[in-house]
Image (cartoon, grey):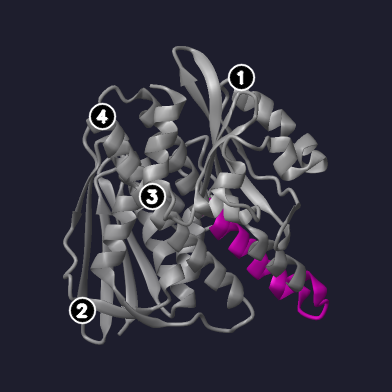
Amino acid sequence: MTSETMEAQMRSVTNHVSALLGYWDKDLVCRFANNTYSNWFGKTPGEMINKITMAQLVGAEVFDKILPNVQAALRGEPQTFEREIPFQSHEGIRFTLANYIPDVVDGKVLGFFVHIADISGIKVLERELLKSNETIKEQNKRLINFANIVTHNLKSYANNFKQILELLLQAESEAEKNEMLAFLKDISKEFSLTIDHLTEIADTQNNSKPRLEQVNLYEYFQRAVETLSIEMRSTNAVVHNKVDPQLTLVSNPAYLDSIILNLLSNSIKYHQPGRPAIIELDASKQGDEVAILVRDNGRGIDLEKNRDSLFGMYKTFHGNKDAKGVGLFLVRSQVEALGGRIEVESEVNTGTTFTLIFKL
């Protein structure tokens, strides 16, 4: 598959989404830039594509800082770097998280794809929080919680982008390519919505309670399933969304997104090897409350041994080297911030059921 064909296919699905997506060849000349990517730099796609080098675009100071990642990508090594690099865009100093995915054809690296997340709002929040000495302890607690939400949630999207692009490069038929491009478009939309929700959390960090609105539980579960579709395919996971499509709850969209995504992601990640992962999502009214259920047939947790530390920060239970022990801590924190409570039943090698209970 040629780079020209790849660029054309990417252009057809990315020019109208909010994620910043581009493509640079081995000479570091821009060969593709969607509207959001070019606008972020204060340019049009026509001013960038086939006309500008990366060094010219970002300037010598920033280019020197990202050069090791660029060189690694050109060696065929995917790069995800979370360090924050100030960049002088047409809107002022910006900060980014970036993913570089090499474009390898017949064993040769032709260039690399770029996906950028603008985290400037997070940096602004950080600076504002650190200015107030009188409330520094409470603000730091909020900042750490928010930073963990950002890292934990956005890594899911970064991994999805990486896996989809790798599958796209390996696709042999047009049908496979179109399927991957459709996934890319859907994930990009969900990523943009998640960024909006995280920005909302940042804007409300100094408020005692999160903003609430009426939300449809079925739709929120379905969005989480679509977001994690690549992980589900790779583990042969099956999700049954049994939630009543008419059931609603007054909640905070950003927190609810994060809660559902974390629980569903854990059910997929900690599936029992040797058997298909089956996950059941359900919700029901119980008097003046709504009970939300996430049940799986995964590895399970020894509650007799771990119940007291189950929702602790940095606590892990399955020896997974990638586990950070942040997800369940965030889930409980966000459930309690919404005035709810969380219950768990689990049996080793049988599965786990989380029940979230909220007032109507």
> Are the two marked residues, 4 and 2, in contact with CB atoms closer than 8 angstroms?
no
Q: Which residue is labeled 2 in the image? A: 285
Q: Is residue 108 magenta?
A: no
Badge 1 local density, few (<14 within 10 Å), some, or many (20+)? some
> Does the magenta run of residues contain 131?
yes
Query: In the structure shown, which secondary structural element does the residue marked by tag 4 occupy?
Result: helix
- Measured from the top left, where is residue 81 in percent x and y? 64, 40
Between the residue at mark 1 and the residue at mark 4, the CA separation in whole angstroms equals 27 Å
Magenta span covers which residues? 129-152
Secondary structure at badge 2 equals: strand
Q: Quadrant of residue 261?
A: bottom left
User: Is there CB contact under 8 Å for labels 1 and 2?
Assistant: no
Q: Secondary structure at mark 1?
A: loop
Q: Note whether residue 314 is visible.
A: no
Q: Which mark is residue 174?
A: 4
**How far apart are labels 3 and 4 at the CA level?**
20 Å
- Residue 72 left/right relative to 101: right
